[in-house]
Every structure is written in structure tokens, then in C-alpha cells.
Image (cartoon, grey):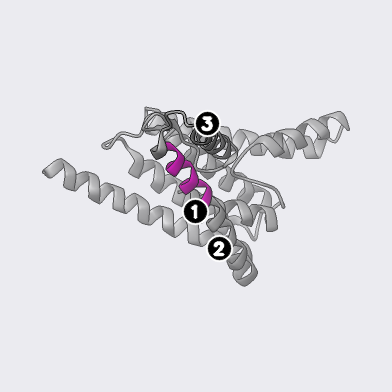
Amino acid sequence: MAFIAGIVNVVGVLGLDHQALTHLTGNTTLLSAALAHADLSASVHFASVLAAFLGGAVLSGVIVQGESLVLGRRYGVALALESALLFGAVMVLSRSAGLATLMAACACGLQNAMASTYSGAIVRTTHVSGMFTDLGIGLGGLLRGAPTDRKRIALCALIIFGFFAGGVAGAFLFDAIAERALLVPAVLTAAVAIGYVAYASWMHRR
């Protein structure tokens, strides 16, 4: 999922409205600057992106109904909706880059909220600031010789690598097919949804 988010974010930065889509720190800062400069158009735009991401998280709360990763919850529905939003973003792109941006941001908010915790670790698959922080804390503990959760360190490193690799792949895809590169994460998300539903059904029958 971090790989998928990496692709979406780099397409947002290189195309669409040339801004990050998978996290809100930068967009919140840009909104602050726009308001300070009384730039109404930019303020509405950035506020809309924030609202779209939040809306995706709200949808996740309605669909999944839980914060921790637990087999059996409706992740398949949430993933299918995320895939539909990304496919929809590509479909409306030629008519409205702004709407495509909002749909992609909503998809990212939905993904990020699907599983907030895993094995006691805070998990965010659409941005890596927290993952770098937790990785640094874990590595610091290792250097100090303190008891450290190595599984958590590995999880953080895996998410960081996945997001980075997705960004690299997304940049190559954008160079080849521009914003239609969003079709790749849309297909991958659909595949994850199908895989999850199949696995959950298999586990239920055991």
C-alpha cells in the first residue's frame, strides 16, 4: 500500500496540480500562506484538497469501523472504493484536473485511515514522516542497548522503502504516460482488494 501511495503522490507532484496528495502538512502550510496573502482562489483549492483527504478518512471510518488491522473487516470494500476513485480521477482528468486532484486525495485519505495500528505500531501508509521518526527512535534504542521492538523497526523500514520505490516507479510511469500513471495504482489497489476478499473467504472456510 505504501508503494501505491508513492506512485499517487509523485504523479500529484509532477502533474495534476503539482502538489503532494498523500499527506496534508504541505497543503496545510500552503493554505496558511494563501490565507495570509488573501489569495481566495488558492485558499479554496487547498482547503478543498484537505477536505477531500478528510472525506476519504471519514469514508474509511464508516466502512471499516475500526482502527486496528483485523482480518474480517470490510477492507475489500474500502480498497475497491479507493481503486474506483483513482480510476475516476483518470477519467475526469481531461475535463477537470482539479476534480481529479480531489478524487486522488480522497483515495489517499481512505487508504491512510484503513489501518491505523498494526502490532502496537502506528501505521501510516501514505506518508513517511512518522515512519522515519519511529525508525529513528528504534535505531537509537538499539545503539543505546535498550530493549527494542525489532519487528516495529522492520515495519517502519519496509513502509519507507515501499513509498520510496513507489515514487521512483511513479516518476518513470509519469514520464511515459503522464497522469494516466494513476491507472497503475488503481489496478494494484483493485488487485489487493480481490486478494484480501479471497484470503478472508478462505480463512473463514477453514
Residue type at mark 2: give it.
Answer: Ala
The spot of residue 183 in percent (x, y) is: 51, 61
Helix, strand or loop under label 3: helix
Q: Which residues are magenta?
A: 152-161
**Residue highlighted by disc 3:** 144
Structural distance between the alpha carbons of marks 1 and 3: 32 Å
Q: In the picture provided, is 41 more to the left or to the right than 155? A: right
Given contact means CB atoms under 8 Å apart, are the residues at marks 1 and 2 in contact?
A: yes
In the picture, which quadrant includes the C terminus? top left
Q: Residue at x 51, y 31 (%)?
A: 141
Examine the residues drawn in magenta and state their main secondary structure: helix
Helix, strand or loop under label 2: helix
- Asked if the magenta segment contains residue 154, the reply would be yes
Structural distance between the alpha carbons of marks 2 and 3: 36 Å
**Residue highlighted by disc 2:** 169
Residue 95 in which image quadrant: bottom right
| Residue 4 can be seen in this image | no
- Name the N-terminal-most of marks 1 and 2: 1
Specify the farthest residue to the left. 206
Q: In the picture provided, is 60 more to the left or to the right than 199? A: right
**Residue highlighted by disc 1:** 3
Residue 173 in which image quadrant: bottom right
Viewer-closest of 133 and 87: 133
Other residues around mark 3 within 10 Å, as few (<14) / some (14–19) / many (≥20): few
Viewer-closest of 88 and 123: 123
Other residues around mark 2 within 10 Å, as few (<14) / some (14–19) / many (≥20): some
